[in-house]
Image (cartoon, coloured by chain):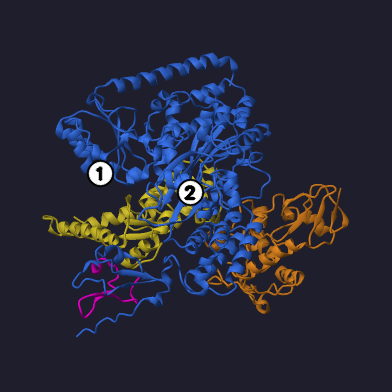
Amino acid sequence: MVRLVVNDLEIEAEDGISVLEACLNNGIYIPNLCFINGMSSPPVSCRMCFVEIEGEARPVSSCAVKATDGMKVRTDTEQVRGLQRTAFQLLMSVHDVDCGRCPANKRCPLQRIAVFLKVPLRPGRLEKHLKNPDVDNVHPLIDYYPNRCMLCGKCIFVCREKHGQPRMTFAKRGFETVISFYGEKDLSGPACKECLACIDICPVRAIVTKDQAVE
Amino acid sequence: MNPANRPEMTQRFEAIYNEAVARKKALNESSQPMIYIGMATCGLAAGALETRQSFEQTLLEEDLAAIIRPVGCIGHCYAEPVVIIDHPSSGFPPLFYQQVTPGKAKMLVKSFLAGGDPLFEHVLGAMKANDMVPQVTDFPRFSQEERIVMGKCGLIDPEDIYDYIAEGGYLSLIKALTLSQDEIIKEIKNSGLRGRGGAGFLTGRKWGLAKDAQGLKKFVICNADEGDPGAYMDRTILESNPHQVLEGMAICAYAVGATEAIAYVRSEYPIAVKRVVTAISQAEELGLFGEGAQGFFDIKFSVFKGSGAFVCGEETALIQSLEGNRGMPRHRPPYPVQKGLNGHPTVINNVKTLASVPAIINKGAQWYRDIGARQSPGTAIFSVVGSVVHPGLVEIPMGVTLETLIFDICGGIPNKKGFKAVQIGGPSGGCLPADFLATPIDFDSLSGAGAMMGSGGMVVMDEDTCMVNVARYFVDFTQKESCGKCTFCRIGTRHLLDILDRITKGEGREGDLEQLESLALAIKAGSLCGLGKTAPNPILTSLRYFRDEYEAHIMEKRCPAGMCRKLTAYYIDLDRCARGCDACVGSCPVEAIFTTKNRKKGIDQSLCVKCGECMAACPQQYDAVRKVSPPDKAPVIERPVEE
Amino acid sequence: MNYSASEEEAGLPDKIALERDVAARLKGFDNHRRNLIPILQDIQDHFLYLAPEAILMVAEHIGIGASEVYGVATFYNQFRFHPPGRHPIKVCLGTACHVRGGDIILENFERKLGISDGETTTDREFSIERVACVGCCALAPVAVVDENIQGHMAPSKVEGIVLGYKIERDRIDRERENEPGEPA
């Protein structure tokens, strides 16, 4: 066990876990989207879980830093909140906000983060960019909604964990990046049908079975 | 390296060295003239192949003998195709000729080789001291250079290992192999060599960390994934003298205990790839490199072709692509020197860093330290392009000022235009205005000014270059090259581009600059890797130094430099236009130019694409084409109704 | 003599021929993941693009999902998924070319050929691609047609280049028509 101080509160954490996990385990919420408990090398890609740690010049990603004894952490500084709000606005600028028709409504982490950061589900002054077409239905069982997806990569992670080789991938690059099931239509094996782990893990319901696309 | 083998190794190398010297001597003693032709990519682009054919054919026609030696690039791009003719029996020293077209080649054979007249009007200078022809080193473009990395570029045959060895090549490796690993690392540390890939990390420290790292296996990677769209020195070095880089890699591998060395070269550089592959196999054939006991020490060399992703210049992304993955960077730490390729300790150094190593080992740390600036010893190589009289690659000691480099060495701005800014460091760097011309070129001074040594790309801009447009260009580039992994870079750079797009089209709004600035700072702070963290630099520096230009675009819908096409218009000054002259008509790619009733010319603004061809085509004595911004300043000239 | 059929074959081998050729090329590589990019490069060097069949075969060879191969291939600028034109035109938009009007050169090619960046003409003669720096900055602006680097480009040169290829094509066509002997 290590003991660290978060927002002036002393907490205990298991050896070797990240600052993010330590905080979440102790009921201190830090917005995060791409981290899964127990991940050995997290992607550090959503850029939400910033904290300030004494001795570090700049905010750091709490999922990528191990909790150590005597560490002094702040999760709520102005700079941290500033970065989180900007990251959230950026995500909103590519997110199709249609909560009423979205199966993730009311259990969506984006809604939770909006409430937590006290920001609307809007991109502020930023222009909205939605992908067209808004659904990829090439997979025999699964539909993918790129304008819901925030590319956390959890689906690929669990697919790899379950099957060794993921059956899905990030495809294209940069702003055009999407999740792709390329080639899956030719593989009508039972693996996907029996697993559906990617659907269970998708926090924003960007990946759904064909029959539950809209609620 | 087994110490017992050292005497045997030295002996073996001595035999190779003697062979190289003998070959060179035989060549030098041959009575035939030697024609050296620069055949790197830029030389070939300028027509070196045709020049070579012309030499060969004319020699045949004239029944003359001469040895044609293809060499690499000397870095003087303005002079391509470059030819050096060494014709000892003529009594002249070796002469440097510039812009040798096939026609000039023919003339040179007939006049010089056959007739003894070296055609002085085409000579840039002599390569050796003499009392007939001024030396090239009398010109500032040559005299102020200090060539450590590029010393042999353009002078030796890059596809002949003996040429390199005869010039002292691989002696440093042999010397290094007689030292201990720690001695080499100490020497590199003491030299103060800093990584030439951009960030300027101390090379000796990196090597020390890799040597101390635990691993069953270690790798050395030469990063030649030169991605800055305005820098090409890594390519030139690999095309012109690949062995010097391989020698640096071998020394590094020995020092850190690596058994595999990989040259990661962009596939867009096919000639560089080919020459590195050739160089490796030549070194293996001579027994310099090889697995197990085949070489002087256990080292396996290979080449990996980068597939075109700017982000792969970033160490962790480069490793991802070597492993067969999408080149998406990882969080650091762990650093590659701890956990790199396949989880093994890996040193990744830039081409120029590695190419500096042999000279340091050969001449010592103190010699290197005495060159350049205190905190940035050694030389810097810049590809100086854009609006300069003598563009090309320049290797200068660190500490030379921007002014000396741009005005004294590269000849200043052509066409009587004024200097406006210099962009240093490509997409990660920044634009510096005239106030900064006195800045010495070294890692810390450039960072302090808001630019960056980066890749060594340097684009000089004259008064006709719009800083907003240039910022937009770089953001467009990084936006397209973003790997897409992290939120700030993936989405943030797109919004930067959106805003700049609007501004350059005259659709800027109040508040745009504030938003640009705050978003840029957030992307800098929030991005995962170096690409994202530095992507806003071109915006931040231009906002700092050229804010008024942004404001002119937004408030007055005016592009002061006249570069943003939506904000400019061309028109023909009817007072100057010559009746009956048609020079501009044929130059227009979209047939936007019409004849007025009194047989002068007008431009149909609805068709004009603002390419400026008519302005270039208009005969100088009329000089009738004008460019204005905002576009509504152009007088309306009606197209006559056709009868 | 029928040239066009054999030419078609060289440019677009049918599926079986393609699969046979890809299989032969795959034999040169062991099935390690680190060979993925070199394999894709080798296939593209030979076939000029990555056909869907080739992607599936590469996936099988390495023992990973087709989506993995697709994900990697779509990440890198180098890989194409459609056959390029017989005369690929690459317009350099490096920094030096940009400040000297490289985008105007690109637009001129696009206008002249009636296609956009990344597309191929319907007769498959030309394709246009924007590239980031071919490393000939001192010759800016630069375009590369086939493998020939055209330095100091100007909008007015675009027409000449395209026309040059069209004239060459017409000449070849004419010679074929005039060729005595076997009917076409």
Measuring from the top left, give residue B54's x and y in whole percent.
Answer: 22, 40
* Type of amino acid at the residue the image marks with label 2: Gly
Which residue reaches farthest right? A10
Q: Which residues are magenta?
A: B584-609
Q: Residue at x 61, y 55 (%)?
A: B533
Q: Earlier in the sequence, mark 1 or mark 2?
A: 1
Kindly identify which chain the residue marked by label 1 belongs to: B
Tell me: residue B252, above or below residue A59.
above
Q: Is-magenta flag for residue B598? A: yes
Residue B457's disc number: 2
Residue A142, can we see it? Answer: no
Q: Nearer the viewer, residue B444 or C40?
A: B444
Chain ID, blue in image: B
Query: Which element is circle 1 on?
Result: loop
Q: Main secondary structure of the magenta part?
A: loop
Q: Quadrant of residue A127?
A: bottom right
Give A128 or B123, whichever is nearer the viewer: B123
Quadrant in which residue B574 is drawn? bottom left
Q: Position of residue B502 (x, y in %)?
A: 51, 71
Residue B33 appears in the rendering: yes
Q: Residue at x 84, y 59 (%)?
A: A7
Splitting the image into 4 quarters, where does residue B625 fall? bottom left
Q: Which mark is residue B101?
A: 1
Q: Give the answer, above or below, for where C182 lies relative to B496.
A: above
Depth check: A4 or B375 in front?
B375
Is residue B465 found left or right of B92 in the rendered image?
Answer: right
Do discs 1 and 2 belong to a common subunit?
yes
Residue C138 in picture, x, y percent from top left: 38, 49
- The chain coloured yellow in the image: C
**Is disc 2 placed on a helix, strand or loop?**
strand
Q: How many marks?
A: 2
Whether residue A191 sits left or right of residue B379 in the image: it is: right
